[in-house]
Amino acid sequence: MWTDQITAKSFSAIQADPDLMAHVRTTGAVLFGDNCAVCHGRDAKGARNFPNLTTNSWLWGGTPEAIAETIRVGINSPHEKTRVSQMPAFGRDNMLKRDEMENAVAYVLSLSGKPPAGKADADKIAAGKAVFAANCASCHGPEAKGNPEVGAPNLSDHYWIHGSDEDALYADVWGGLQGHMPTWEGRLSPLDRKILALYIVDLRKPAK
C-alpha cells in the first residue's frame, strides 16, 4: 500500500518518488480542503491574519519536518508542546512612546523597499532603526530577517500576515499580536499530518 510507504519513508525519499507524490497531491488536497482551507483559503494563499502557505516565508520553519510538527502541536494551542509566540503590546502597555512606535514603523516599512520621501522621513527611519535594535531585534533579528525558533516573522520581505500599510503596522506595534493555530494531533493521524506537510511544501512557489 502507498500509505505504508509514506509512513515508513523519510520526507525526502517521498518527495523524490513521483508515484508517492501523486498520492500526496490527491489526498493532501482533500485533507487541506477539509481542515485548513477555512483559514488559509482553498488555494492556501491565506488572508488577513492567516499566512500564505505557498511562499518561502515561514514563522516556525518551512521544512516538511517543521511543518508536520506545527500541524501536530499547533501555535498557542492547548497542546502541552505547542509552539508559543506573542508580540508585546508596546503601546497599550506603555513600553514605547507614540513617536518611538511611529519611527519603528517607518524603519520596518523601509526594509521592504519603501524609500524615504525626504530628510524628515529619513530621520524617522534612522531613529526607528535604533528603536528596533533596542526592542525588536531580540526576536526578529538584527537585520529583521526573523527567527523560526520563536515564531518571529521576517520583516524584510514582501509577505505580511496582518497587513503591510502604515496603519496596520502601527496597530500591531501598539496592541501586540498572538496568533493561534489548533493542534491537530487528536483529529488527524500521523499519516494524515505527514501527507499534509508534504502537500503544503509541494505548493510552495520558487524563491524570489
Image: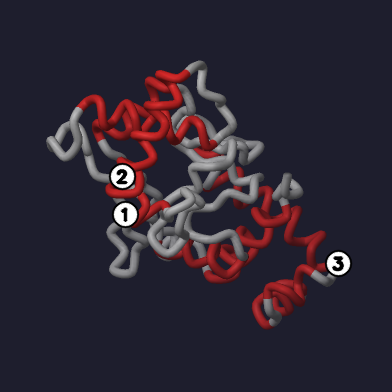
Determine which quarter of the picture holds residue 2: bottom right
Q: Nearer the viewer, mark 3 or mark 1?
A: 1
Residue at 40% from the left image edge and 19% from the top image edge:
120
Which amino acid type corresponds to the residue marked 2 in the rendered image?
Gln
The residue pinned by badge 1 equals 76
Front-most of residues 58 and 120: 120
Q: Earlier in the sequence, mark 3 or mark 1?
A: 3
The residue pinned by badge 2 equals 178
Q: Nearer the viewer, mark 1 or mark 2?
A: 2
Front-most of residues 124 and 24: 124
Front-most of residues 87 and 40: 87
Which amino acid type corresponds to the residue marked 1 in the rendered image?
Asn
Q: Is residue 64 left or right of residue 66?
A: right
Asked whether the residues under the numbered discs 1 and 2 touch, taking CB atoms below 8 Å apart as contact, a structural biologist would say: yes
Residue at 84% from the left image edge and 71% from the top image edge:
17
Q: Secondary structure at mark 3?
A: helix
Q: Quadrant of the C terminus?
A: top right
Asked whether the residues under the numbered discs 3 and 2 touch, taking CB atoms below 8 Å apart as contact, a structural biologist would say: no
Residue at 38% from the left image edge and 30% from the top image edge:
105
- On residue 19, which mark appears? 3
